[in-house]
Amino acid sequence: MGIISVEHRGNLYWLGRYEERVYTTLHSFFGYYDITLDKDKNSYRNFLNSLEIEDSYGDYKGFIRGFLFDKADGSSVSAAFHSAYDNAMVIRNTIGSEALAYIQLAMDVFHSARDTKNLRLALMPVMDYLLAFWGSIDDKLFDGEARTIIKGGKLVERLDLYFRFNYEHKLINSEYEKLCHILARAPKGLCNTQHLAILVEVMAVENSYKERQEEVLDSLGKLFEGHAV
Amino acid sequence: MEMTTTAALEINKLMTRYGVKFGIYKNGEFIEQLFPYDAIPRIISKQEFDFLNKGLVQRVNALNCFLQDIYTNGNIVIDKVVPEEFVYISKGYLPECRGIVPPGGVYSHISGIDLVQAKSGEWFILEDNLRIPSGASYPLIARELSRIGNPDAFSDNDIAENRHYSDMLSNTMDSVNCGGLNVILTPGRYNAAYFEHSYLAERTGALLVKASDLVVENAVLYLENYLGVKARVGAVYRRMSDEYLDPMTFQADSLIGVPHIMDAYRAGNVALINAPGNGVADDKGIYYFVPKMIKYYLNEEPILSNAPTYLPYYEDDLKYTLDNIRKLVIKDVSEAGGYGVVFGSDLTEERLSDLKALIKREPRRFISQEVIDFIDLDVMGEDGSRVPRKADLRAFVLTGVSTRVWPSGLTRFSRVEGSFVVNSSQGGGFKDTWVLSR
């Protein structure tokens, strides 16, 4: 067993969550962005509804400016990016300078996209760098316990967002299976597996999560409870 | 050495990519910024380095002897080589460390010795940093990235390898380790040198820890994991000041220290790198006495010279300082980081007069030095032109089983034309330091 302190564990877990929050939020955002091009300028409101965020942005332009790039807005992608970076930089010695550099590169491209006319194109390298980050984690993070924690955080966040965005059962199930695989290999005491029961129940019946979303999200959040940073 | 603007830009892009930063506090706010890097290296010939190497090893060995003496018998004071006013009432002297001989008898494991080269070519020691000297990580990563950004420079020149600093540091930790893990203790994310803490942890394989991760039981230091399992710690490369290290021994309101870590240290169960209490030996006042220490402890002539220095504590030096203040640089011995340094030539008559009065009132608080017109090094301007800027050199000397000088160093330069202030906290930049291998 590695020597991973309480705080270090929290940093690993929340790095996984924030990185994934940026990635999946942007991924989902691109779908709504496409709709706004020629179909519905207000589709961003559905996006906000899914995330239970009040529309304080006024209009679509305000939404882009605020939700994506306003670091002071705690719900923004920018804020999630900074939180990911803050957690990553304190564990450089675990994840490695290369993985940290991918976050830095992704952030730099993200911020420079703010004034571009072709937002989607400008943000594509952000997704590339985030995937490279995970590639680096898979390839270079030799401490299995640390890898389990960071990937646990990633999958918890991904499932959380997939549930919120009502992704299809097949997709959710595939991520759920990955999470189970991770938990099966986790050292004893790493996860509060009793909170898995609701998830197991819900996933057994297709689409039942739509009625029980609140319970499911609550359970997911508690899987690694007590180590928030 | 040719350095194209393109290569310099590439290297700086890599520095951004790898987050080579340092933090400063401005108006109470922590700001993290890239450490300005100039890709034109400082070059030191092999012959010159061999000379510096001997002088630096000699100096650090004498300083280690001094620390052991001061915290045990105090012979150098008894023999009146160093006046006791410069030792026992120094802010850096810690009575709590009296009688403690650290593992291996080493006090200053990592010494940062600041030097300048005068226009005559002669090197002078400006300052000894024996507490927690920082900066080695910057030329270390700069070398790694320069080899990517400007590979031809390394094929075309015979440059001594500097990337083994992490091995030197690991060996130093191992040599004094009392059994257990090597850890780097950081005050946290908002420390100016946090990049260095995390980068050195990555490179050495030591664990980067905060005080909250550590616990002392029965005078043994442990690192506790998230399940409460404890692993013994044998060496702590601590990157926080003495006063914050242990709230039970030093500053009681320190929230970043480890309660009772001094008990483990006193019992010989853990090595603290560097040893607490080293401040007594790198005080600007004690600097004056280092050549005397070399003679006293090693019975050798000093190889490297101090900058000509006067101690107003002595009547003759006080008179000289007051009579010549306009051409001298005056340093407040209690300040660091380039603060508390004033050039007599920069002061108005009124301020000179105030300063003279202060020196007369508190002579122990100041030293005065002749201004060394140290050399300018070329720095690349934004348009690719070369401009001369003042630069110093921080050499890193590591002591474990033996004392070794890292064949590189942190060259800091002023970004303001004509200015002698090179400190990063005051806007200075840095260069890699190439030691030629033949």
Image (cartoon, rainbow, N blue to C red):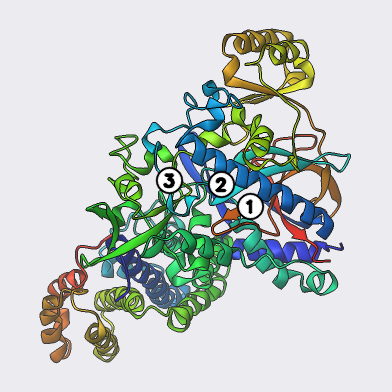
Q: Position of residue B105 (x, y in %)?
A: 48, 50
Chain assignment, label 3 = B
Dot 3: what SS?
loop
Q: Amino acid at mark 2?
A: Pro
The mark nearer the N terminus, 1 or 2, is 2
Residue density around tag 1, few if under 14, some if 14–19, many if 20 or more, within 10 Å: many
Identify residue for label 2: B133
**In-front residue for pair B86/B356:** B86
Residue density around tag 2, few if under 14, some if 14–19, many if 20 or more, within 10 Å: some
Dot 1: what SS?
strand
Name the residue furthest right: B120
CB under 8 Å between discs 1 and 3? no
Query: Mark 1 and mark 2: span between their CA atoms?
Result: 9 Å
Query: Mark 3 and mark 2: span between their CA atoms?
Result: 21 Å
Q: Amino acid at mark 3?
A: Val
CB under 8 Å between discs 1 and 2? yes
User: In the drawing, does residue B20 fall left or right of residue B194?
Assistant: right
**In-front residue for pair B62/B18:** B62
The mark nearer the N terminus, 1 or 3, is 3
Determine if marks 1 and 3 fall on one subunit: yes
Disc on res. B316: none
Q: Position of residue B291 (x, y in %)?
A: 69, 35
Task: Single out the mark in the foreground, 1 or 3.
Answer: 3
Identify residue for label 3: B101
Q: Relative to B46, say whether B97 is above or below.
A: above
The quarter of the rendered structure image containing the C terminus of chain B is bottom right
Q: Amino acid at mark 1?
A: Phe
**In-front residue for pair B173/B357:** B173
